[in-house]
Amino acid sequence: MPTPTVVPFPAALRPREGTPFPLAGASVAGDPDAAAELARLVRARTGLELTPAASGSIRLRVATDAADAADAAGVAADAPGPADRPATPPESYVLTVDEASVTVTGADAAGLFYGVQTLAQLLRRHEGEWVLSPVEIEDAPRFAYRGVMLDVARHFFGVEEVMSFIDRAASLKCNHLHLHLTDDQGWRLQLRSRPELTARAAGTAVGGDDGGFYTQEDYARILSYAASRHVTVVPEVDIPGHTHAVGLAYPEIAADPVITDEVRADAEAAGVPLPVAGQPYTGIAVGFSSLRIGDARTDAFLADVFGELAVLTPGPYLHLGGDEALGTDPADYAAIIARTVGIIAATGKTAIAWHEASAVAPLPADLIAQYWGFVTPSPSTTAARAAAVILSPSDAAYLDMKPDADFPLGLTWADGPTSVRRAYDWEPAGMLPGVEPGDILGVEAPLWTETVRTLADIDALVFPRLAAAAEIAWSPAPSASAARTWDSFRERVGGLGPLWAALGIGFTASTEIPWH
Ligand code: TNX
């Protein structure tokens, strides 16, 4: 049997001898949400309808007692007492296929959902029929945080598009959606404490395109859809840089734009005016905006914004940005980071910031740093000082880097154009000196949207490279799994092309991948 087309590759996969399980006429029993998800995927891929039945040949369930939990962890129920038994990891599942039955047991609802995604990837044609080959899979994630980021500030994406993005990420077992909600070009979330933000600073986007914003009802819909796909939303309000739009709404707390040579060069290249206080900015330069730090009105703004964001957001994290604050004096920068981390901690949430913020002294406790330098870090990297680190190396994990030189979308600043292989061939452990494997919370692949306007644009940049980030985040390290090689990965990704096409994912058919 060829390597099954599963991405990310499971912790353990053992093909079994025997006749494949036929899909035609199969019935599904067990968890109704999982059954509906499997039926959706099977319908899209094969056109077959799975019938629900109390004693179905496909059984989907969440482990409910100790024996089930041991089972989901791949341990015999009569194994030595609880103390000797490995704890059932969250999000894990066990999947078995034989000629007569298919069973997926999740340690929890997320684990069951992931088992169903794996099942959909395993569907194949055999002698003219849709089948599943006999197999035994025990699977659990390597990292707890497996993220994607969508920048809805440079270009705005509506609720339906965000939901589609969530589906795509969740199908690759990603469990966090970082929403970059604010930037120089626009503010995208309605806040009742600060109504002028969306009244005055949400109308435009890069290139003069239409803006937009999420009402609180929209945001609640995104959150509840994400929860149904086992995805935690991490909202980002970027301070103190990337705040030109704030000045359109609350000019009294905006610092004057700092026009550097880079900002000037970008304005000339893009044919857009320089940033002007109080007017919408439609270029793509960075680092010119800041807030009036130390002003009580700024502190009140931060307390309102992060306080309300905490109330609206069920997940444990609030992201405060902190990147590229080139227009901010270092002492002011340290002060506003400390102040904002304090506000976030007081809400009961944990602050995440881009890694520059982990350079401030004293370093706030519990701050999680998101590293966006290169795979080979520069000596000045500060992420190692943080309590935990999320890895988003820009030369490997940035989905907005051009996949090749003639590609119409994307940027190249992070040593681009990039490649699928570059997205795959990096290892989190040991990447940053001073960051121990246990300090790595996980991996996130960001999509910045300066050049991205539609869901089709998103797909073209995100696929297939998100599959690489997802495998790095979920699968065992290459040293612990024979399938964790570029050759195995490219074969498996190639096998997923028809499933992605059936689901309407407009992936880029990279020449590095042998597409089926
Ligand atoms: C850098 S990476 C940024 C963003 C840009 C992105 C484009 C980081 C934390 N900031 O403001 O959109 O490059 O690739």
Image (cartoon, grey):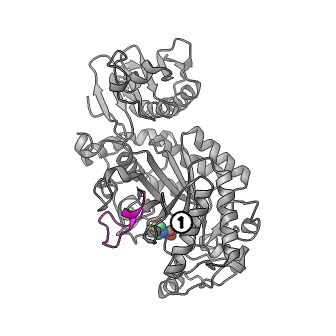
Tag 1 residue: 321
- The quadrant of the picture occupied by the C terminus is top left
Instruction: Evaluate whether residue 131 shows in this view.
Output: no
Seen from the viewer's position, the closer of residues 92 and 132 is 92
**How many residues crowd mark 1 within 10 Å: few (<14), some (14–19), many (20+)?**
many
Q: Does mark 1's beta carbon lie closer than 8 Å to ligand 1? A: yes
- Is 497 magenta? The answer is no
Seen from the viewer's position, the closer of residues 244 and 58 is 244
Q: Most prominent secondary structure in the magenta stretch?
A: loop
How far from the left and from the top, in percent, is residue 82?
38, 23
Q: What's the magenta region?
A: 371-389
How far from the left and from the top, in percent, is residue 15?
28, 25
Position of 401 with respect to 177 (left or right) is: left
- Is 388 magenta? The answer is yes
The residue positioned 34% from the left and 69% from the top of the image is 415
Position of 82 with respect to 313 (left or right) is: left
